[in-house]
Image: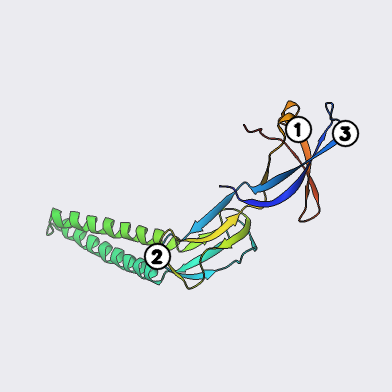
Amino acid sequence: MKRNLLAISFMFLCASNAHAQTKLQARALLYSSSHTVLSSQVAGKIKKIRYKEGDAFNKGDLLFSMDCALEVANLNKARAEISAASKRLEHEKKLAEYGSGSALDLELAKDGLAKASAEKQMATTTLNMCDVKAPFAGKVVELKAQEFQSVAPGREVIEIIDTSDFEIQIIVPSNWLSWLKRGSKFTIAVEENGKSYTGKIEKIGS
């Protein structure tokens, strides 16, 4: 879903037909091509929100982080279980070499190490979800939660837009369609900053 940013004046300069040198004015809307709302992927308390509404950020910047002390503890536990499972497996291998161990105990030791490794991977993945980074460069539109607020997984936290790539949507009189074509160039005058920019028609809707 794209988000409306502002209203602009649309000035079309046609130079290939009867409207040559004629300036036709209409109202238009400017949209960001990339717009998303980022949510918490884990349950817990929001530890830090690093940007406020209107702040700019770069791709890969940390937008907000969760207090994941429990997830850190789970990862440490998984690491300890891997260490213990590795030692048990080595012990069973030595017993097997001397013919004093059982094949079942060796297989169980191998399964124990595999299980501990899987639990470590799960704990690592969950911990990585505690830091939410920007998927693109842009600006913060709205904060939907606050620092120190406890949230559930899927709770919306921050709304962002890409400020490097924009599209313009305009509704024109039907008689313009007789000469308005894809590739036609136009000039837009943005009221908020008083500047003008050039663009071209990419597609014509129904």
State the image coordinates of residue 38 (x, y, percent, origin top left). Answer: 51, 57
Residue 45, percent across and down? 44, 70
Position in image of residue 102 (x %, y %): 12, 56
- Which amino acid type is marked by label 1? Ser
Please identify, in this view, whether the residue under mark 3 or under mark 2 is nearer the observer.
3
* Residue drawn at x 76%, y 56% as measured from the top left: 192
Q: Residues within 10 Å of mark 3 (few under 14, many from 20)?
A: few
Q: Relative to the observer, which residue lies in front, 147 or 118?
A: 147
Whole-number angstrom distance, CA of label 1 to CA of label 3: 14 Å
Q: Quadrant of the C terminus?
A: top right
**Mark 2 secondary-structure assignment:** loop
Residue 21: mark in rendering: 3
Residue 171 quadrant: top right
Residue for point 58% across, 61% down: 142
**Could you tell whether 37 is left or right of 72 in the image?**
right
CA neighbours of label 2 inside 10 A, class few (<14), some (14 to 19), many (20+): some
Judged from the image, the secondary structure of the residue bearing numbered disc 1 is loop
Mark 2 — residue?
A: 43
What's the CA distance linking mark 3 and mark 2? 61 Å
Of marks 1 and 3, the one in the foreground: 3
Q: CA distance from mark 1 to mark 2?
A: 51 Å
Amino acid at the residue labelled 3:
Gln
Q: Are the residues at dot 1 and dot 2 in contact (C-beta closer than 8 Å)?
A: no
Residue 174 shows which numbered tag?
A: none
Q: Residues within 10 Å of mark 1 (few under 14, many from 20)?
A: some
Image side of residue 64 versus residue 123, left or right: right
